[in-house]
Amino acid sequence: MNIELIKVNKNERTKLEKLLQLYLHDLSLYFPLDFDSEKCEYDYDLDKYFDNDFAYFIKSSNDILGFILIDNNGNYNYEISEIFVLNNYKEKQVGTKAVIKAFDLYRGNWIIKAVPKSKVAEKFWIKVVSKYTNNNYKLSHTGKYNRAELNFSNK
């Protein structure tokens, strides 16, 4: 399956917001997220992804398979803050291919923080980063959730 990262335009924000709600619902299994009962949605501020940071749809042909959000932390420092693949495209290397494309788009220092308390997420990130860097990365466990944090450079 051919995977592309297509930058989300401001006029496509609603599509991204809908996908983000699916993602946040899944994420709420691992740690508490604020849910607005009036709006019936999880709180998340997407504004920065239309200013300094980057939002991409993961696509194959014209089909949206998910999204990836990349934080631009300045001075060529980047972080994948969120990645989501729709359930019917999981286990098909969609996430792996999307992450590698993101790494190739932005050269610099990267930090990846795996979803806390998720061995699946930690295993995914270690596998992808290990393969991409030929095992040239630093792994630590940080914060109150003891989440896996991977650091590497692809300058």
Image (cartoon, helix red, strand yellow):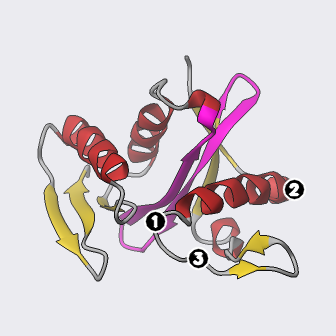
Image location (x, y in percent) of residue 2:
56, 19
- Of the two numbered discs 2 and 1 in the rendering, the one whose residue sits closer to the viewer: 1
Which of disc 1 and disc 2 is earlier in sequence?
2
Query: What amino acid is at disc 1?
Result: Tyr
Q: Name the residue under label 3.
A: 33
In the rendered structure, does residue 93 fall within the stretch colored magenta?
no
- Residues marked 3 and 2 touching at CB (< 8 Å): no
88 displayed left or right of 117? right
Which of disc 2 and disc 3 is earlier in sequence?
2
Magenta region: which residues?
A: 59-87
Q: Residue 43 carries which label?
A: none
Q: Which residue is drawn at 15% across and 53% down?
A: 137
93 displayed left or right of 67? left
In the rendered structure, does residue 64 fall within the stretch colored magenta?
yes
Q: Which of 153 and 26 is in front in this view?
A: 26
In terms of secondary structure, where does tag 1 sit?
A: loop
Q: Mark 2 points at which residue?
A: 11
Task: Kindly tell me whether residue 9 is visible in this rendering.
Answer: no
Vertical placement of residue 89 versus 77, above or below: above
Badge 1: few (under 14), some or many (20 or more) residues near its Cα, within 10 Å? few
Q: Mark 1 points at which residue?
A: 30
Query: What amino acid is at disc 2?
Result: Asn
Q: Nearer the viewer, residue 108 or 29?
A: 29
Image location (x, y in percent) of residue 123:
27, 45
What is the spatial separation of the Cα atoms under label 3 and label 1, in whole angstroms?
A: 9 Å
